[in-house]
Image (cartoon, rainbow, N blue to C red):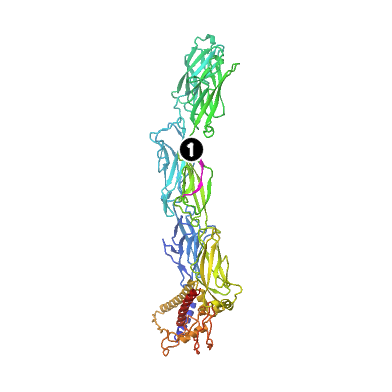
Amino acid sequence: MRREPRAALALGLLHFCLAQPNFAPHFFDNGLGSTSGNMALFSLPEDTPVGSHVYTLNGTDPEGDPLSYHISFDPGTRNVFSVDPNFGNITLVEELDREREDEIEAIISISDGLNLVAEKVVILVTDANDEAPSFVQQPYVVLVPEDTPSGSSIFKVRAVDKDTGSGGSVTYFLQNLHSTNFAMDRHSGVLRLQPGATLDYEKSRAHFVTVVAKDGGGKLRGAHVAFSATATVTVNVEDVQDTAPVFVGTPYYGYVYEDTLPGSEVLSVVAVDGDRGKPNQLLYSLVNGSDGAFEINETSGVISVMQSPAQLRREVYDLHVQVTEVSSVVSLAAQATVPVTIRIVDLNNHPPTFYGESGPQNRFELSMYEHPPQGEILRGLKITVNDSDQGANAKFNLRLVGPGGIFRVVPQTVLNEAQVTIIVENSAAIDFEKSKVLTFKLLAIEVNTPEKFSSTADIVIQLLDTNDNVPKFTSHYYIARIPENTPGGSNVVAVTAVDPDTGPWGKVKYSIYGTGADIFLIHPSTGLIYTQPWATLDAEATSRYNFYVKAEDMEGRYSLAEVFITLLDVNDHYPQFGKSIQERTMVLGTPVRIEATDQDAEEPNNLVDYSITRAEPANVFDIDAHTGEISLKNSIRSLDALHNITMPHRDCTWSVEVQAKDRGSPSFSTTALLKIDITDTETLSRDSMAAFLIETKDNPMKAVGVLAGIMAVVVAITVLISTATFWRNKKSNKVLPVHRVLRRRPSPAPRTVRVEWLKFRRAKAATKFILKEDLPTENCNNSARSSPPPKAPALPPAPRMAPSTAAHWTVPTVSGSLTPKLPQQSPKPKDLGNPIQSTLVSELKQKFEQKNADSKACF
């Protein structure tokens, strides 16, 4: 009788709700710093990782309808965010860059299915220190006069950093903090000469200064980082006139033969301006000692005899030649003086002869380091060439015979006698690794004599090695494959690097580094890589290792190569069955699947084949060797056919011993004992509860999920009713009393009713057991006071069937059947409630336990 007012109330409430207008939903405005709402005043650091959950759209609907959320962007702009339409979770899908885009415009919307509300929001992208300073207007080349005063500013570099705040501030310093010539202003980037430092063109024509620009640091992905950049300033030193001229090829000797004609050339003196960057013109002159017998060309330095040899009064003339610079600057001209000795000879009866420090010599040896500076003089060679004749007979040319373009000889023309100077022309060709010994012939041959007397001297230069080569690996990468059961301390692979240099510079030291190098060592001398003594390799945990090897010489010059090591899988794991395969229920026509896993890393070691090793009788079950599906033989299509085969074993549960065997070599296998109950689909279709119990026997979590779903529905209905009641009371300004309905707990059903219920629910999986009727005294109250159980609204009514008068009935099962004695008269089952179902489940549990004990004893 109480249900009619409640039904009327619910119907009235429904009409009331339908008559109300549907209001549009709206976002919550949670303000600055919030991560939930309508994204008002929302900002996001540019270093936020892609895929991060950055915000949650949150709103409400006045009617409480389900809401959906959306986000969109203007055409032509990037879709930076995505949103979960159900929960409003906004995810970053593209990388942010404040320097390229410092704000993002988006349109967010909320909808209840009928109304759509959209808002335009602006998301600010905040800065992170992700940019490094960058030098502008490179390359930096500056020309500085060598007489620049110390402390002077010579250049200014400039670097910019696109970041803001401390990450965008740039300071400067020199990479070589111990530089003795230059200093850098930290803030302005001005490069200065150090106090007390001077430049000298003659000592060094260029300086290379490495400047470092470093930002102030800042946060990047949660860590404080600072970036820097480098630039090289090339300081070319400009020569100024501060060095006197220098004569080349001294000492100078000349000879005048008795047949020499007046005006003939005797010898040439050569001088160069000491300021080679901007050399001035040089003028030569004779200071004294000539007595009018000799003159010198003021521009070429050629000394000529002006008298006939018969008129010359002395056998030897000691002249002094002066060279003077000609400069446009009005200042004291730089000068230099050199003595010149001229001898008077008469016959051409002597070829040119080479002299060393101890006399005539036709072989000169010198040791020098490879790659000397361009223009360097081989000062270790003390060579003098002389022709004892006089005049034109003593004039000869000098040249080097051998590999061309490496050295040149000065002077090239000699009159009587000269000091031979050999100058480096091609430094790159003087390479110890190409040739350890350079051999030349110094040839002196007369120029204007019919005899063409000549002589040669061997120039042997022993090159000394320098560390000018980097060790190089024979390969850029090395690949090795080793079994995973390799013991610790085993050799893996040998790497080889070659340094062409000799001595200590050619010795290579090996080392390894990288994330994958922890369990490996390398011999520093041989390059042999081997595992740590304690290392245990496991292909299932880590199958590949990758690291770098470094070959380094004694001065730190090095090269790198990459090493890849792959672990070969070894069959060292047994197949393992899951924990839930002990008992399974099989429905006719539907196979039961078992599964075993093998933890090996590669095929075929982790491939599993299945087989039945033992079953009684052996003609009931088949198994698929690849999938593990167990099914009945094709000849067994019903329970009756199964009973005919298994008649001697009707009282036992079927136990099947299953083997899982991998395909490795050697192969490993595991066996498991599986107990199988079999029923048919017809039995399951008669009782949904029995089908459910059998279905969830192997998966208890499914039953828990169903119960949780029922409880969620009940809670949702209760919340809706409570909400409707609250709003009705609020609008009527009344507080209605709360009525509590107390119900008496129903008494357990009589025993006869329970037995009759089992009779009509015989399709249940648990009815494979036989129910023997006891006296109706257990779990029952006084039958005189018992009342019929109330109807249970959560369960459907039991099927109505005519009372059975048969004395025996059988429940179909694989393990057999028991025959209970039923009462002759049984009341017609009515709508049974929850107490009867609870009693049924309790007894079924006891029967299953008894059945398991019997099956163990039988097997």
Residue 191 relative to residue 689: left or right: left
> Does dot 1 land on a helix, a strand or a loop?
helix
Circle 1 is placed at which residue position? Answer: 506
Q: Is residue 125 magenta?
A: no
What is the crowding at mark 1: few (fewer than 14 residues within 10 Å), some, or many (at least 20)?
A: many
x, y (%) of residue 834?
46, 81
Q: Is residue 495 magenta?
A: yes
The front one of 491 and 460 is 491
> Is residue 21 at least partly visible in the picture?
no
x, y (%) of residue 777?
43, 86
x, y (%) of residue 60?
45, 69
Q: Tell me the kind of residue under disc 1.
A: Gly
> Is residue 788 at least partly visible in the picture?
yes
The front one of 343 and 52 is 343
Residue at the spot 45% in from the left edge and 22% down from the top edge: 335
Magenta residues, start to end: 489-502
Q: Say if 824 sits above or below 253 in the image.
A: below
